[in-house]
Amino acid sequence: MKTIYLTGFMGSGKSTVGELLHRKTGAQYLDTDQLVVEKYGAIAAIFENEGENQFRHYETEVLRDIPETGYIVSTGGGIVEREENITLMNKSGLVIYLDTSFEEVARRLGNDTERPLWGKTVLEKKKLYKRRYEWYTETADIRISTDGKSPTEITDEIMDYLT
């Protein structure tokens, strides 16, 4: 099985769905944010001390090491911010975009303080969402709408594509 990359805005369910896909397929599971944390430290600290650009560099570094087969990979919401990341994912695997409306993301995340880019104004968050939305849709091999669906329903829908 080709490696599967789950993309989407923060709060779209990538990590939860990734874990469920791992259980259903038996493929190994990786989360790029967790890989960055393990190798370089807390994401919020990286943003604060080194900046978003450095975080994006670390993200690319861990992405390069992911094998082309046998993995389910939950990516960070901004993985599409770098052309190199898009190229790596499209070349080495199947990209599935978990398409979640801004309203649904806002409902799911509420006042989450763990995500550095979610602490912005509503206008700034909407601008970020809109910019990334174009990249998600252009990058994806498969697009799954997640609004109003449970993680299990989303996982089952992805499984239908894979079988």
Image (spheres, helix red, strand yellow):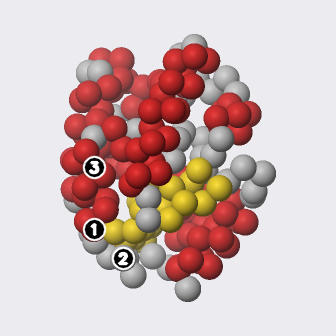
> Is 90 located above or below residue 118 in the figure?
below
Query: Which labelled disc corresponds to residue 85?
Result: 3
Write the residue at 31% across / 62% down: 90
Q: Nearer the viewer, residue 35 or 101?
A: 101
Write the residue at 40% across / 39% down: 78
- Which quarter of the rendering shows the C terminus? bottom right
Callout 2 amino acid: Lys
Ranked by sequence position, the earlier of labels 1 and 2 is 2
**Number of numbered discs visible in the structure rendering:** 3
Ranked by sequence position, the earlier of labels 3 and 1 is 3
Q: Residue 68: percent from the left, percent from the top?
A: 28, 71
Instruction: Tell me if mark 2 has few (under 14), some (14-19) or many (20+) residues whose alpha carbon lies within 10 angstroms of its own.
Output: some
> Is 43 located above or below residue 36 in the figure?
above
Write the residue at 54% across / 39% down: 10
Q: Is 97 left, or right, of 149 in this rendering?
A: left
Q: Nearer the viewer, residue 52 or 96?
A: 96
Q: Residue 29: percent from the left, percent from the top?
A: 45, 65
Disc 1 to disc 2: CB gap under 8 Å = yes
Callout 1 amino acid: Ser
Write the residue at 39% across / 32% down: 42
Kind of element beneath mark 1: helix
Query: Which labelled disc corresponds to residue 2?
Result: 2
The answer for how far apart the CA atoms under marks 3 and 1 are is: 11 Å
Please indicate, yes or no, whether residue 78 appears anywhere in the rendered image.
yes
**Residue designated by label 1:** 92
The answer for how far apart the CA atoms under marks 3 and 2 are is: 17 Å
The single residue placed furthest to the bottom in the displayed view is: 163
